[in-house]
């Protein structure tokens, strides 16, 4: 089995390494991550909402597969205790709810993910921590057993530890700086630079998988500088808060489970509020495509907007029905989600014709340059399914989900 190098050790990269290691020697898998802090972007700062059937036809099978993989992994590895895996109920909080429609590009115009829900809104059950305002409509928008909740940072850490324990080689912090080809102009190795020791290592490989999220286009351009092709992935910045409320207690958690609340009443700003196991409540919804992508994920901390934080705090006070002194802010965050124009992720092999002149890859399994990026708000939800399908694709096995419409279009 040839060596596989995965560029980007976020949840998509670690999921891919995890599933690859089930069918090939783990020591033949290399994870490369340049950020000094692991999971410093969406993999650690996302909401952790999981859905089974909130997706368009192109990604529906991937979404359903991933939801089932999340459930199985949680049952096998104690996800409830280790990364807060929990059943959830999704709720729309708004004036009268209008027609439901599938929404893949919700984040571009501030629309709410509630519009993509498929549940029966006939029953209105508000969680005990949610403050009700007269005139607001509270509707259940998910079917039983079709949504769940995790702490994405804890899940990412668990997956990475499983990989490392199995023998996957982690290069961190390190950056892939170039590729080399053999006498036939086929990809033969990749040069990785350790950013702390300034040492460089050539890793013989015939397969590269780019899973660098919003940074995927830059990774591709660095490795294939003579190519005029650009990966069609851009970034969407999103602020978030993790808070505690005296109204979200262990008793309520045990009795009612977690909830995902989607507010749809404010044009251009649709807050998302997720209660998590352990007493934390996650609040997000302020997104911007204009925020420049930093060189490294860890640099985002310096760009956190105080105005954005205060607006999210206002939302917390409104939704939780508490005074400012009762909102304990556990963490402020700014992460960059990878998005595409279609609103669906890209999964597949990059044609050799896109790699530039005099660069080719070994045909069939055991060779090629692949990409898995552009999941938008669904990176955590689709992570395990993506990892499984990418591993099957690279290893030449039958795919567990039809992702043909997610292939790179060139």
Image: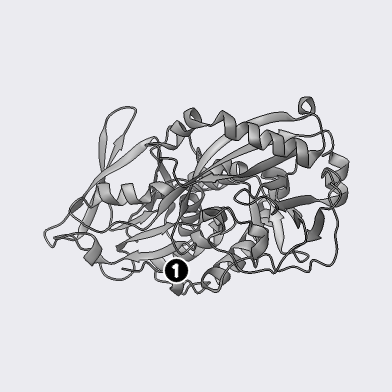
> Would you place residue 408 above or below residue 73 in this image?
below
The x, y position of residue 133, in whole percent, is 84, 46
Quarter-wise, where is residue 367 in the image? bottom left
Residue occupying the point 79% across, 66% down: 121
Q: Name the residue rendered at 51%, 72% in the picture.
A: 58
Residue that protrudes farthest toward the left in the picture: 183
* Residue 342 point in image, percent of width and height: 46, 64
Residue 403 image position (x, y, % from top left): 47, 71
Count neighbours of disc 1 (C-alpha within 10 A) and say few if under 14, some if 14 to 19, many if 20 or more: some
Query: 8 or 408, which lies in front?
Result: 408
The residue wearing badge 1 is 406
Quarter residue 25 falls in: bottom left
Please state if 162 lies on the left or on the right of 193 as rendered. Answer: right
Query: In the image shown, does 175 or 120 lie closer to the viewer?
Result: 120
Q: Quadrant of the N terminus?
A: bottom left
Of the 4 image quadrants, the one containing the C terminus is bottom left
Residue in the image at 77% along x and 39% along y: 318
Q: Is mark 1 on a helix, strand or loop?
A: helix
Relative placement, left or right, of 154 versus 98 is left
In the image, taking residue 397 as reference, residue 186 lies left or right, namely: left
Q: Residue shown at 23%/52% (left/top)? A: 224
């Amino acid at each position: 089995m040839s060596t596989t190098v995965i560029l980007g050790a976020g949840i998509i990269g670690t999921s891919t390494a995890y599933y690859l290691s089930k069918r090939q020697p783990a020591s033949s898998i290399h994870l490369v991550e340049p950020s000094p802090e692991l999971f410093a972007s969406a993999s650690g700062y996302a909401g952790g909402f999981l859905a089974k059937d909130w997706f368009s036809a192109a990604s529906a099978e991937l979404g359903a597969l991933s939801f089932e993989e999340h459930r199985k992994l949680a049952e096998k590895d104690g996800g409830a205790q280790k990364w807060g895996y929990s059943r959830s109920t999704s709720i729309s909080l708004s004036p009268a709810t209008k027609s439901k429609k599938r929404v893949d590009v919700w984040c571009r115009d501030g629309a709410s993910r509630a519009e993509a829900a498929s549940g029966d809104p006939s029953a209105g059950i508000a969680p005990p921590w949610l403050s009700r305002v007269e005139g607001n409509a509270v509707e259940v928008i998910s079917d039983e057993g079709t949504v769940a909740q995790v702490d994405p940072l804890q899940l990412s850490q668990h997956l990475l530890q499983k990989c490392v324990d199995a023998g996957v080689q982690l290069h961190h912090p390190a950056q892939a700086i170039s590729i080399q080809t053999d006498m036939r102009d086929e990809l033969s190795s990749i040069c990785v630079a350790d950013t702390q020791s300034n040492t460089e290592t050539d890793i013989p490989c015939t397969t590269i998988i780019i899973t660098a999220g919003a940074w995927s286009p830059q990774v591709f351009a660095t490795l294939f500088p003579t190519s005029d092709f650009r990966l069609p992935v851009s970034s969407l910045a999103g602020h978030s808060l993790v808070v505690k409320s005296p109204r979200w207690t262990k008793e309520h958690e045990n009795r009612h489970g977690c909830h995902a609340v989607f507010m749809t009443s404010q044009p251009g700003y649709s807050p998302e509020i997720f209660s998590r196991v352990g007493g934390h409540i996650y609040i997000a919804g302020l997104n911007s495509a204009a925020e420049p992508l930093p060189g490294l994920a860890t640099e985002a901390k310096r760009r956190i907007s105080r105005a954005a934080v205060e607006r999210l705090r206002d939302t917390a006070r409104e939704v939780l029905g508490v005074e400012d002194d009762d909102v304990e802010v556990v963490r402020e965050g700014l992460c960059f989600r990878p998005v595409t124009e279609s609103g669906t992720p890209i999964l597949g092999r990059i044609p050799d014709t896109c790699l530039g002149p005099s660069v080719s890859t070994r045909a069939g399994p055991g060779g090629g340059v692949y990409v898995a990026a552009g999941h938008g708000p669904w990176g955590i939800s689709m992570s395990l399914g993506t990892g499984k399908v990418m591993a099957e694709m690279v290893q030449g096995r039958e795919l567990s989900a039809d992702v043909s419409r997610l292939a790179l279009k060139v």
